[in-house]
Amino acid sequence: MLNWIWLCFVVVAVLVAGFTGRLEAMNNGAMAAAKDAVMVIALPLMGIWAVWLGVMRLAEQSGLVQLLARALRPIMRRLFPDVPPDHPAMGAMVLNMAANMIGIGNAATPLGLRAMAHLERLNPNPGVASNAMCTFLAISTASIQLVPTSAISILAVKGSTSAHAIWPTAFLASLCATAAGITAAKVLQRLPIFRIPPAGIAPTTATDRPAPAAAEQLVEAETVQPAALRPWGKVIIGLFITVFVIFLVMLAFRDAVAGWLEPHGFVIPAAPKLLVGKPPVLRVLFSMATLAIPFMLSFFPLYAALRGVRVYEQFVEGAKEAFGTAQRVIPYLVAMLVSIAMLREAGVFDMLQAWLGPLFKSLHFPADLLPMVLIRPMSGSATTGIFVELVQRFGPDSLIARTAATIYGSTETTFYVIAIYFGSVAVRQTRHAIAAGLAADITAVIASVFLCRLFFPA
């Protein structure tokens, strides 16, 4: 499917640009996108990937990933019946989902890449997306957002009096999107057009690799047996977690803590501006999001060290994967971003807005949101720009701005995610992954409009 979509993007862009006299703009946009894909996106991300892949390596070698997967085994077995319950892929997917839920996308992407690498090793048909891959991508595209940090931050910066008000709408919209994405993935995988060959039969295309060994052998190869956590190690872990709980209380309830400790000579740092005046539940959630990265960066190495893992060496081993991942991803990223830039510069999105605007208006869908809805599956930076412009034009507390923020917080750049995730494992036949991801995006948009009209009546 991705082959035909990409071809349509390029051909339509060239034809439209030719008829509208925007060929030069399209050429410049395509070359700029190719440069940005490597210099602005892939290379800077490689450093971030190195950090989180190193941390993920520590979590695997210490057995922490397996513990997390075991704890969520009942849910994960239903979602991914083809993945062995104790396989590291389960833990990697759990960590990716958790990172997405609390809004730390910098951690979610490399964890997702790690999960895809494990899923590809279990894939009996390399180069063809497995059912587990498609379901995982649908969940990643429509991940439940406990804290839509970016959307709320933009509203707050632009002067909203209640930026946090979109929290329930974004949460519920992303919940609907996740349900729709999982349902679409499970239904579409049964259709004849999306069926995969029986296990062990390699794909027919000449560029695909031969099928790997049986999944059971891979599970055995991935098994790690770190040293048992000794009683004094459990004490250290307990103290460490206690310290972060104290940090959480200090951050979420700064005024109460300061009133108790400052008379005794303690100096409590000022609370972040985003937390001032927020309800207790939101203060706790935002504080958890703030502390999530420092906790993961310190807890995983500490836990691994206490279980006998040589943390520096294993971290470096994991970080090395970032370079190979970036090398595999860059061609897919360039292809996708160039085709999207060609469409944009050719004026295709402007034409779609003009044509579809009256239809959406008749459906009581705000036409001003149409450009953002059209561009969201394709470009995160462009969507951010459109979102900021809407907030500036209509005001941060307007219905349009809050609906846009809800859409922004409950949807994902589907084509970018597909290019990154599938490109990292050289999957060329994406089967129903795009359809499931777009189903999640469409559901999120519809739910966002409905919920915002319900929560924020004019």
Image (cartoon, grey):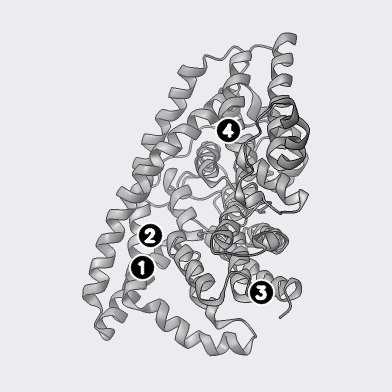
- The three-letter amino acid code for the residue at tag 4 is Pro
For mark 1, what is the residue?
7
Q: Looking at the image, is mark 4 or mark 3 nearer the viewer?
A: 4
- The three-letter amino acid code for the residue at tag 3 is Val
Pointer 4 or 3: first along the chain: 4
Residue 120 lies left or right of residue 276; in this view the side is left
For mark 2, what is the residue?
336
Pointer 1 or 3: first along the chain: 1
Circles 1 and 3: CB atoms closer than 8 Å: no
- The three-letter amino acid code for the residue at tag 2 is Met
Q: Look at the picture and state if 293 lies above or below 426.
A: above
Residue 318: give x, y in percent of width and height: 46, 27
| Real-space CA distance between mark 1 and mark 3, rounded to the nearest whole angstrom | 32 Å
Residue 427 lies left or right of residue 156; in this view the side is left
In the image, which disc is placed on residue 449? 3
Pointer 4 or 1: first along the chain: 1
Other-residue count near label 3 (Cα within 10 Å), few / some / many at <14 / 14–19 / ≥20: many
Q: Would you say residue 207 is visible in this rendering?
A: no
| Real-space CA distance between mark 4 and mark 3, rounded to the nearest whole angstrom | 35 Å
- The three-letter amino acid code for the residue at tag 1 is Leu
Q: Would you say residue 272 is visible in this rendering?
A: yes
